[in-house]
Image: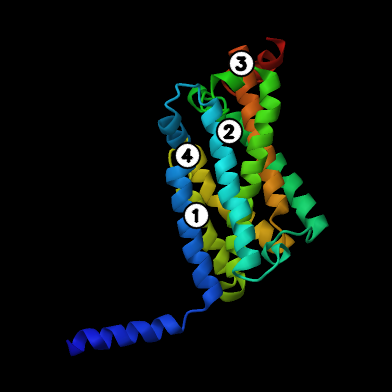
Amino acid sequence: MSYFKKEIRELSKAVRTLSFKETFIFISVAVITFVSMYYASPNFFRKIFDTSDDKFYSSLYWFSADGFLMFVVPLLLIYFVLKGKPSDYGFRIGDLKFGVLTSLIFIAVMLPFIWIVSGSKSFASTYPQGGMFVRENMDVLLYYELFVGFYMLAWEFFWRGYMLFGLKEKFGYYAIFIQMVPFFILHRGKPDLETFASIFAGLILGVQAWRANSFIYCFFVHWLVMIFVDVISVLRYKSDSYGIGFDAFIKLFTN
């Protein structure tokens, strides 16, 4: 019995050395991610409403629910539990010159990459994630991308704002790697190239947020990349143009 008492005392002593802020951020990120995985997913929506829709409404639910969980909830936690301000967690303009310049560079680099990976019919058929209804109706694609934008705002704030800046003081540059790991893991189920690339995307966006002192630029980069992916995938579908050659590019618009 004395052995267990000793272990409990040592554990209690270790727990008392933990800082509240970082401990709360780790636990809250885990809890929010759990709720997101099981109750904000398209599969949960389809199960509850027993709908056979072509991914459209379930995707809108997913973007809205995750937007609330990863944006609104952390903001409330910052205000009422951590007693901080959104600007302390990267919700600011920060270094405008650096943010805009690096965003333009990232997008310029990503465009050829998007063109290459979308040349695969299996990849292009994955997007837009709203399914055939979005793919068949270009006018729907516009407001669909607004939901995507809200989701991306929440996604970037959660990892590159709440988690990165919340852990920055305690862990320094290691916070960039800490936020990258769950970011990468949650890409599971996406096309393999996208999942692998998310390792480097998580690191690059983390560095950008750190240096710019803002997650806002990461949000715009991520959102624009997703818009490009969706639009190019729709154009490829409508023109039946796959591959990466110049003829495929011409066919994309002439058809």
Residue highlighted by disc 4:
41
Q: Quadrant of residue 227?
A: top right
Amino acid found under the numbered disc labelled 4: Ser
Q: Is the C-beta separation of discs 1 and 3 under 8 Å? A: no
Q: Residue at x 44, y 84 (%)?
A: 16
Look at the image and tell me whether residue 111 can be seen: no
How busy is the neighbourhood of tag 1: few (under 14 within 10 Å), some, or many (20 plus)? Answer: some
Q: What percent of the width, then of the height, locates residue 198? A: 53, 47
Q: Quadrant of residue 88?
A: bottom right
Alpha carbon separation for disc pair 1 and 3: 34 Å
Location of the N terminus by quadrant is: bottom left
User: Which of the two labelled residues, at mark 1 and mark 3, occupies the earlier sequence position?
Assistant: 1
Q: Residue at x 46, y 50 (%)?
A: 35
Q: Is residue 96 left or right of residue 255?
A: right
Q: Is residue 238 left or right of residue 5?
A: right
Residue highlighted by disc 3:
136
Q: Is residue 23 left or right of residue 84?
A: left
Amino acid found under the numbered disc labelled 1: Ile
Query: In what element is the residue under mark 1?
Result: helix
Q: Quadrant of residue 76?
A: bottom right
